[in-house]
Amino acid sequence: MRFRLLLISLLMAFCTIHSVAAQSTAAADRIVGIYYVKDDQSPEEAKIKIYKTTAGTYAGKMVWVKTPTFKDGTPKRDIMNPDPAKRNTPADQIQMLMGFRYDANKDEWVDGTIYDPVHGKTYKCKMWFGGEKILKIRGYVGIPAFGRTMSWTKE
């Protein structure tokens, strides 16, 4: 009888843990998708695809830019990148977001970075939803108080 109670208790605990983990994964994965980005400090318009990596973190990459070429017709590239090997990357293939993990307690994606291809700088970053389809992105130096927030719209 005691063994049965112990077995039932362990089974219930496992089911509860599994259910909580599944809910957390679903909450974390809702960030996956394509976002329209219009920066108020730049004339550029782009689309960023956020995806889950094989390591279980979240990352994002440009998949479309409204103006992929300069006025002279040459393709826009990541010319400001501090890594010379990446300066030839086409504008619509630039890796923008890296290394985010989901914090279920805060309902935020944290511990990641965002790359600014206009200036070739990388900043600490966190993300959260400010509405069903509005993703808030805060890039910062040091602590979040020293940063700027953008809103991206999920398609």
Image (cartoon, rainbow, N blue to C red):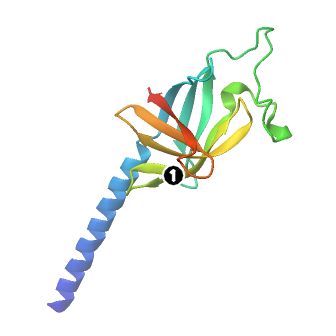
> What is the x, y in percent for residue 54?
58, 52
- Quarter of image, res 2: bottom left
Q: Is residue 145 above or below residue 151?
A: below
- Quarter of image, res 77: top right
Asked whether, in this view, residue 102 is left or right of residue 2, the answer is: right
The amino acid type of the residue labelled 1 equals Val
Furthest-front residue in view?
Answer: 145
> What is the x, y in percent for residue 68?
69, 17
Q: Is residue 99 above or below residue 132?
A: below
Q: Residues within 10 Å of mark 1 (few under 14, many from 20)?
A: some
Furthest-top residue in view?
Answer: 72
Furthest-right residue in view?
Answer: 84
Q: Where is the C terminus found, in terms of image quarters?
A: top left
> What is the x, y in percent for residue 61?
61, 35
Q: Where is the N terminus found, in terms of image quarters?
A: bottom left
Residue holding disc 1: 110
Q: Is residue 41 above or below residue 61?
A: above
Residue drawn at the location 27% of the way across and 66% of the way down: 16
Asked whether, in this view, residue 59 is left or right of residue 105, the answer is: right
Residue drawn at the location 82% of the way across and 42% of the way down: 83
